[in-house]
Image (spheres, rainbow, N blue to C red):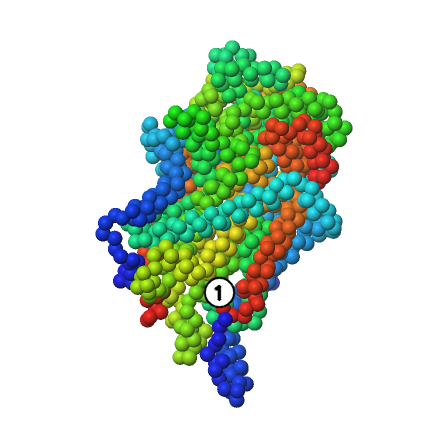
C-alpha cells in the first residue's frame, strides 16, 4: 500500500498538509470525472435498463409492463439455456488456463534470444487480427471428418483413424476450445512478454551470479513479478469467455443439436432473431449476476478495500 | 532504442540440446498457428470448381490471384461491386481517433487509480470492470436512444465515442495493473521534487509505459479495426467501416458463396492489424522500463 | 408593393424553389436490404436501374444477413432516422412496428394495384394487419424443393422419389452405391427447413398449419404427426457424418459434384448450381416430395416503408411501390434472384425449368402453403428449431420425447 511522502509531515502542519493533499489530488479527481460519468450513464444506466426489461413481456421493441418472474421461470426450464451455462464453464476453465499456460510458454521461449523473434511473435498473434466469420470456416473444414484431419490421416493409410469431435455432440465443445486457444493464446503471450520485458535487468544479473538455473528464475522470481500482467490477461480472457459468440456462430452455430450453445448466443438470438427482448435480457441479467457473484469478492478484496496500489 | 536491448543469458555459440528444444517448441507451435492460414491461402488461390472438390489442404492445381483482386476491388457487396476497398478510408478515419483517445483515457485512468488516492475511485473501477463482462449487444438499443437524444447518432463522433466508452474497462485495467508493477519510489521522488498530477504523468510515468502502450495499441487497433456491430449501428451510412463490406462479401444467408473471395477478403481486411503487430514488435524490447528507471 | 408583401413574396418564392429542389432531391431513396452475394446483387440492380430510369436516385444500403439488416433497420426507425424503405421477410417480423404506428399504410396502393387479385391470397394476408396493407411483397420463394443430381440418379437406376417413404428407399439404394443420399447443411435453420418439408409433404398442409400456426396440442399428439416425426428421424441415416455445422452452400456442392444425390432447400439454392454452370432440368432437377404431387411452402421478401410526413419522401415511396411491382421488373428481378414473381399474371415461360414448375404448382391455391414465418412468431419458430435440432442430432432421442418438446414449445413460447 502506498505511503505518500507527505505522511512524514509534522503534527503541527497536519491541517494544512491535509488541505494541500486534497488540493494536490484535485486534478486526479477531475481526470477521473469523465469516466465516472460514463460509468454512471452508460454502464450502470444500461445495466438497470437490462434488468428492468427482464421483468417485462417485451418482444421486438422494449415496453415497460410488469410480468414478475415469468421470464426467469421460462429461462430455467429452457434446456438450451442450461446447456449453455454448462458449456461456458467447460470452455471458460479450459480456455483461460490453456491460454495462460501456452501464452506463458510462448513468451518465455521467445524471450530466449531466438532468431526471427518478430516472425514468431507475429505468427502467434496473427489469428487475433482476423475476423472469425471466415477463419471459423477454415477450422470447420479442417475438423470436418470428411474434409480435414481425419481424411488426411486416413489417406496416408491409417484407415481406422478417427477424429470427429466437431460432429460429435459430446466432444464438439472442445473443438471450440481449440479454435479459441488458437485465437487467444497469442494475445496472452504479448501481454506476458510485455511484462517480461519490463522486469529489471539487475534481477537477471543477480540471479545469474547466484547460479540459479534459468527455469527456476522464471518460475520463482519472474512469475510472481508478472502477477499484475497475469491478472490483466486473465480478466481480458474472462471477458472474452463471457462474450463468447462469434467463434461458436462461425464454427458450429451451436450444434450438433444444442451441444455447443453458449449464453451470449442465447441472449443475441433472442434479442435480434427471435424478437424476444424480455427473455434475452433475463438471460443477460443472469449472466451479470453470475459474474458479480464470481468476481465481486475478488474485486472487493483486491481493488476496493485497499485504498491504494493493488499488488 | 536498440541500444537498450540487453540479451538475456549468454549468447549461445553452439546449438545445445536446450536450444534445439526451444526451437522445436516454437516451430511446432508456429505450425499449429499457421494451419488455418494455410487452408485460407490455398483456398484463396483456387478457382471455385477446384474448391468444390473439397481437397482443402492441397496446393492449387490451377493457381489464380483472381480472388484477391476481386476481393479488393470488384466483389459485390450489394448494388455496388467494388470489393472491400470502399470502406478502407472510413475504417482508418474511425480507427485513428478512437485508438488514440481510448488509450489516452485508459492511461490517465490507470495512472490516477494506481498512484493517486481519490475517494470512490476504486468503486468506480470495480463497476467499470463488471461492465466489461456484459455482451455489447445488450447495450445497443439504449445507446441508440441516448445518442439520438443528443443528436450525434450516426456520425463519426458517435462511433468514436462508442469505441472510447467500450474501450474504457480494458484500457483502464491494462494501465492500472501495469503501473502497479512500477516502483513506487519513482513516484515519491517526483512528488518530493514538487511534481503535480500532470507533470508526473507526462515526465515520469508516460516514458516508462512503452511496453504496455504497445499491448494497448495491439488490443485497440484489432478490436476497433475488426468491429462490425458498432460501426453498423452508430457510424451512419457515410462512415460505414470496411468490416461492413467484408461482412457483405463473406456472410450470406441465401446467396451463393465464393469461398476463394471470402478467404482473400478476410486476409486483406486483416492486413492493417498485422502490420501494426509486426511493426510494434520493435518496441517489444527489454530494458526500456529499466533504462528509464535509472534515467 | 409594400415591403411586407415583398418580403412574403420573397419568402414564398424561396419556399417554392426550396421545396421543388427538395422534391427533386428527395426522389432519392435510401434502400436497406440484405442482398449482397453476386447473384442477389444482380437482382437488386434490376430494381435500382428501373427506379433510376423513372427519375429517382437509388441510395443502396446493403447489410448482409437478415438478422443484421433487420436490426439495423429497426434501430434506424426507432432512432428517428429511417431509410426510405427497408427489407423484411414476408411474415410476422414487422408486426410490432405496425402496432407502434411506425410504418406507412399502403392500403391505397394495394387497392389501386389490385394486389388481392394478382397475388396469392396468403401472401397478401401476410402483409395485411387489421385490414390494412403495410408491406410490398416482391417475390415468392418456394422453400421445400428437393434438388437432385440427374446423373447420379440415372447411374444408380433410381427414380426421383415422389413420397417420403419412397425417398427413404431410394436413399438406401444410393447409399449402397457409395453415394451420400442426402446432402444437408447441418445448421439449425436447414434442419428445421427439412423438417417442414417432411411435415407438409407427409403430414399435409392442415397438419403443418395446426402445428406451426395454431399450436394445436392435439395435433402434436396425433398419430399422423408421430409418423412424420418418425420418417424425419429415419432420414438421419441418409446424411453423411460431416453434415453438422456445414454451410448449405457446401451441401449443394456435394450434389453439384455428384458426391451426393439429393438436397432439400429453398429455390435460392439454384444460385449455387448456376454459379457452377449447371442448368435446371439437365444436370440437376427439382421436385416436390409428398402425397398428391406435393405442396409448395412459400415465403419471400417484402419491403416496408417507414412512416413519414415529408411529401418528397412520400412521393418517392409511391414511385418505389410502382417500380417494385412493374411486371417486367418483376420478371427480370426474379430471374436473377431465383424466386418467382409475386404477381401471378406475369408470363414465366422465359424462366428456368424449376421456376416454371413453381409457377404451375401455385396456379392451384390448394398447393400453396404458408411458410413458417408467415404463421408463427419468430420466437415460436426459434423454439421449434431448438427442439428439431436436438432431435435430429441425437439418434437416441425417441419420437415421443421430441413430441413432448414440441408440446412444451407450443405452451411456453410467446
Between C327 and C377, which is closer to the camera in this rendering? C377
Relative to B182, is A82 above or below?
A: above
Picture coordinates of residue C187, whole percent (x, y): 55, 33
Q: Which residue does the image show at 35% across and 64% down from the upper left?
A: A203
Q: Which residue is mark 1?
A: A311
The chain holding disc 1 is A
Q: Nearer the viewer, residue A173 or A36?
A: A173
Tell me which corner region of the image, top left, top right, bottom left or bottom right, holds residue C169. top right
Q: Residues within 10 Å of mark 1 (few under 14, many from 20)?
A: some
Res C298 → quadrant: top right
Drawn side of residue C266 relative to residue A101, left or right: right
Q: Residue furthest bottom?
A: A12
Residue B239: horizontal and vertical position, in percent?
A: 47, 50
Q: Residue furthest front?
A: A211
Residue C214 seen: yes
> Can you name the residue that lies furthest to the top here?
C157
Percent across and percent down for residue B74 are 40, 37
Residue C414 sits in quarter: top right
Counting labels gives: 1
Specify whether residue B142 is in view. Answer: no
Residue extending farthest left: B13
Rendered location of residue C172, percent (x, y): 55, 16
Q: Measuring 49% from the left and 49% from the top, which residue is drawn there?
A: A97
Nearer to me, A74 or C346: A74
The residue located at (36%, 48%) in the rendering is A122
Amino acid at each position: 500500500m502506498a505511503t505518500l511522502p507527505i505522511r512524514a509531515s509534522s503534527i503541527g502542519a497536519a491541517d494544512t498538509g491535509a488541505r494541500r493533499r486534497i488540493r494536490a489530488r484535485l486534478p486526479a479527481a477531475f481526470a477521473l470525472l469523465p469516466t465516472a460519468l460514463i460509468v454512471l450513464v452508460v454502464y450502470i444506466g444500461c445495466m438497470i435498463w437490462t434488468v428492468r426489461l427482464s421483468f417485462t413481456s417485451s418482444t421486438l421493441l422494449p415496453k415497460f409492463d410488469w410480468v414478475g418472474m415469468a421470464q426467469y421461470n421460462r429461462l430455467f426450464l429452457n434446456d438450451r439455456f442450461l446447456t449453455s451455462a454448462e458449456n461456458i464453464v467447460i470452455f471458460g476453465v479450459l480456455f483461460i488456463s490453456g491460454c495462460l499456460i501456452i501464452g506463458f510458454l510462448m513468451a518465455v521461449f521467445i524471450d530466449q534470444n531466438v532468431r526471427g523473434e518478430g516472425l514468431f511473435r507475429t505468427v502467434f498473434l496473427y489469428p487475433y487480427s482476423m475476423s472469425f466469420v471466415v477463419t471459423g470456416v477454415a477450422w470447420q473444414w479442417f475438423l470436418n471428418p470428411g474434409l480435414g484431419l481425419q481424411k488426411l490421416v486416413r489417406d496416408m493409410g491409417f484407415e481406422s483413424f478417427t477424429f470427429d469431435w466437431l460432429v460429435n455432440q459430446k466432444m464438439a465443445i472442445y473443438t471450440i476450445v481449440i479454435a479459441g486457444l488458437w485465437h487467444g493464446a497469442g494475445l496472452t503471450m504479448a501481454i506476458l512478454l510485455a511484462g517480461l520485458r519490463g522486469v529489471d535487468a539487475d534481477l537477471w544479473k543477480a540471479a545469474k551470479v547466484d547460479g540459479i538455473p534459468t527455469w527456476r528464475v522464471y518460475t520463482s522470481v519472474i512469475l510472481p513479478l508478472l502477477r499484475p500482467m497475469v491478472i490483466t490477461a486473465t480478466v481480458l480472457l474472462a471477458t472474452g469467455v463471457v462474450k463468447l459468440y462469434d467463434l461458436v456462430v462461425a464454427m458450429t452455430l451451436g450444434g450438433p443439436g444444442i451441444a455447443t450453445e453458449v449464453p451470449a448466443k442465447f441472449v443475441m438470438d433472442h434479442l435480434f432473431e427471435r424478437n424476444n427482448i424480455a427473455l434475452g435480457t433475463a438471460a443477460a441479467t443472469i449472466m451479470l449476476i453470475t459474474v458479480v457473484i464470481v468476481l465481486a469478492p475478488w474485486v472487493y478484496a483486491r481493488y476496493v478495500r485497499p485504498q491504494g496500489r493493488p499488488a | 532504442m536498440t541500444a537498450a536491448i540487453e540479451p538475456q543469458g549468454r549468447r549461445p555459440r553452439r546449438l545445445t540440446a536446450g536450444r534445439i528444444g526451444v526451437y522445436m517448441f516454437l516451430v511446432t507451435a508456429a505450425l499449429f498457428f499457421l494451419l488455418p492460414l494455410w487452408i485460407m491461402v490455398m483456398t484463396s488461390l483456387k478457382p471455385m470448381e477446384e474448391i468444390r472438390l473439397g481437397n482443402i489442404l492441397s496446393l492449387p492445381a490451377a493457381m489464380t490471384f483472381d480472388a484477391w483482386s476481386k476481393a479488393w476491388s470488384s466483389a459485390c457487396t450489394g448494388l455496388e461491386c467494388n470489393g472491400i476497398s470502399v470502406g478502407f478510408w472510413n475504417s482508418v478515419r474511425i480507427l485513428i481517433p478512437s485508438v488514440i483517445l481510448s488509450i489516452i483515457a485508459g492511461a490517465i485512468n490507470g495512472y490516477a487509480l494506481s498512484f493517486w488516492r481519490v475517494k470512490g475511485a476504486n468503486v468506480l473501477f470495480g463497476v467499470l470492470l463488471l461492465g466489461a463482462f456484459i455482451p455489447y449487444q445488450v447495450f445497443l438499443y439504449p445507446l441508440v436512444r441516448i445518442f439520438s437524444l443528443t443528436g450525434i447518432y450516426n456520425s463519426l463522433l458517435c462511433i468514436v465515442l462508442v469505441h472510447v466508452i467500450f474501450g474504457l474497462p480494458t484500457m483502464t485495467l491494462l494501465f492500472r495493473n501495469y503501473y502497479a508493477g512500477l516502483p513506487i519510489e519513482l513516484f515519491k521522488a517526483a512528488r518530493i521534487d514538487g511534481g503535480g498530477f500532470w507533470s508526473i504523468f507526462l515526465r515520469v510515468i508516460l516514458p516508462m509505459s512503452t511496453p504496455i502502450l504497445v499491448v494497448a495499441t495491439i488490443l485497440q487497433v484489432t478490436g476497433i479495426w475488426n468491429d462490425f456491430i458498432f460501426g453498423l449501428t452508430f457510424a451512419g451510412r457515410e462512415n460505414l467501416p470496411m468490416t461492413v463490406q467484408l461482412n457483405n462479401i463473406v456472410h450470406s444467408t441465401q446467396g451463393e458463396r465464393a469461398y476463394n473471395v471470402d478467404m482473400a477478403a478476410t486476409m486483406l481486411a486483416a492486413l492493417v492489424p498485422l502490420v501494426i503487430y509486426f511493426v510494434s514488435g520493435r518496441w517489444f524490447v527489454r530494458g526500456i522500463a529499466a533504462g528509464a528507471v535509472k534515467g | 408593393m409594400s415591403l411586407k408583401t415583398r418580403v412574403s413574396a420573397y419568402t414564398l418564392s424561396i419556399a417554392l424553389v426550396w421545396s421543388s429542389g427538395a422534391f427533386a432531391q428527395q426522389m432519392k431513396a435510401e434502400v436497406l436490404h440484405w442482398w449482397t452475394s453476386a447473384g442477389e446483387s444482380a437482382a437488386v440492380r434490376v430494381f435500382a436501374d428501373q427506379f433510376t430510369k423513372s427519375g429517382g436516385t437509388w441510395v443502396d444500403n446493403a447489410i448482409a444477413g437478415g438478422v443484421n439488416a433487420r436490426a439495423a433497420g429497426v434501430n434506424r426507425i426507432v432512432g428517428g432516422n429511417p431509410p426510405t424503405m427497408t427489407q423484411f421477410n414476408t411474415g410476422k417480423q414487422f408486426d410490432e412496428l405496425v402496432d407502434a404506428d411506425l410504418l406507412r399504410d399502403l392500403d391505397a396502393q394495394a387497392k389501386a394495384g389490385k394486389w388481392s387479385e394478382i397475388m396469392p391470397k396468403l401472401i397478401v394476408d401476410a402483409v395485411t394487419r387489421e385490414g390494412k396493407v403495410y408491406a410490398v411483397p416482391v417475390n415468392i420463394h418456394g422453400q421445400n424443393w428437393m434438388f437432385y443430381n440427374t446423373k447420379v440418379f440415372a447411374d444408380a437406376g433410381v427414380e426421383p422419389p415422389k413420397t417420403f417413404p419412397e425417398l427413404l428407399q431410394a436413399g438406401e439404394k444410393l447409399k449402397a452405391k457409395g453415394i451420400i443420399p442426402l446432402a444437408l447443411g447441418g445448421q439449425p435453420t436447414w434442419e428445421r427447413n427439412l423438417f417442414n418439408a417432411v411435415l407438409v409433404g407427409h403430414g399435409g398442409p392442415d397438419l403443418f398449419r395446426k402445428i406451426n400456426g395454431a399450436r394445436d396440442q392435439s395435433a402434436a399428439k396425433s398419430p399422423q404427426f408421430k409418423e412424420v416425426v418418425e420418417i424425419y428421424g429415419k432420414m438421419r441415416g441418409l446424411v453423411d457424418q460431416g453434415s453438422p455445422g456445414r454451410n448449405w452452400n457446401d451441401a449443394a456442392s456435394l450434389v453439384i459434384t455428384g458426391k451426393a444425390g439429393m438436397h432439400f432447400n429453398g429455390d435460392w439454392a439454384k444460385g449455387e448450381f448456376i454459379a457452377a454452370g449447371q442448368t435446371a432440368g439437365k444436370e440437376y432437377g427439382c421436385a416436390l416430395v409428398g402425397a398428391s404431387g406435393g405442396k409448395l411452402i412459400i415465403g419471400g421478401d417484402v419491403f416496408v416503408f417507414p412512416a413519414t410526413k415529408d411529401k418528397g419522401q412520400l412521393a418517392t415511396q409511391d414511385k418505389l411501390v410502382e417500380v417494385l411491382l412493374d411486371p417486367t421488373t418483376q420478371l427480370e428481378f426474379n430471374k436473377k434472384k431465383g424466386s418467382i414473381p409475386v404477381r401471378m399474371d406475369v408470363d414465366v415461360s422465359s424462366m428456368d425449368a424449376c421456376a416454371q414448375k413453381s409457377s404451375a404448382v401455385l396456379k392451384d391455391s390448394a398447393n400453396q402453403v404458408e411458410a413458417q414465418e408467415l404463421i408463427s412468431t419468430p420466437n415460436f419458430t426459434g423454439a421449434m428449431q431448438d427442439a428439431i435440432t436436438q432431435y435430429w442430432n441425437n439418434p437416441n432421442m425417441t419420437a415421443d420425447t421430441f413430441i413432448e418438446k414440441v408440446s412444451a414449445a407450443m405452451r411456453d413460447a410467446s
